Amino acid sequence: MKKMWILSLILSVSILGCATTGVTPQKTQLQIREFQTRSYETNDTKMVMKAMLNVLQDDGFIVKNAVLDLGLLSAEKSVDIENKGEAFLAKFFEGANAVWKKASIIECTANVSEHGKQIRVRVNFQVKVLNNKGGIIKIEQIDDEKYYQDFFSKVDKGIFIQKEKI
């Protein structure tokens, strides 16, 4: 009996020791800043900002502010994320007090600045999730490296088009 108890204890400890939490380590601010930033071999701030404006508008963003002297851009995009099934169940069980995810707003801010003979661009994307009553469910920074790579890939193409005057 004692051997069974020891064996089950060893087995339990080994199983627990192998378990992972599934939590991915949080990125440092330096890591985030690195993929949020791109440098371009030009000293034409206006051309880079114009390319970024075009990319943001092509992606469905509404530009809220653009200040060339400061190199500042801000834009936002609204996306309907309502799930009809979730909305129906919420209304069915909670009636007039029902709350469900309704929309998300992706906000973008960009800083375009001269850095020697280059233009350095840093962008930041943030998402707000709103409920059906307009309340904020959550706000979080988008820290997916691929999201930024995709954005800068479009900006690269936009700058090429601007340079070639296509």
Image: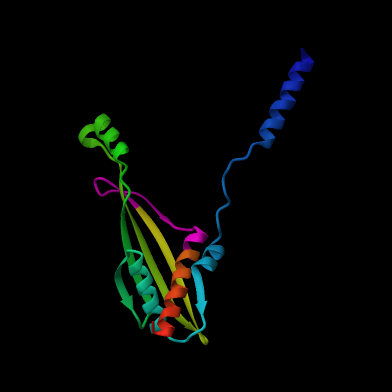
Foreground pick, 53 / 141:
53
Q: Looking at the picture, how far across and down is residue 128, in whole percent?
A: 35, 54
Q: Looking at the picture, how far across and down is residue 33, in whole percent?
A: 52, 67
Residue most extreme to the right = 3
Q: Which residues are magenta?
A: 129-148
Q: In the image, what residue occupies the spot 38% across and 56% down?
A: 127
Q: Is residue 159 magenta?
A: no
Number of marks drawn = 0
**Does residue 144 sit above or below 117 in this rendering?**
above
Q: In the image, what residue occupies the spot 79% across and 17% down?
A: 3
**Does residue 121 sit above or below 16 in this rendering?**
below
**Does residue 133 sit above or below 116 in this rendering?**
above
Foreground pick, 60 / 93:
60
Q: In the image, what residue occupies the spot 33% across and 48% down?
A: 81
Q: In the image, what residue occupies the spot 72% across and 26% down?
A: 11
Image side of residue 33 versus residue 99, left or right: right
Q: Is residue 139 magenta?
A: yes
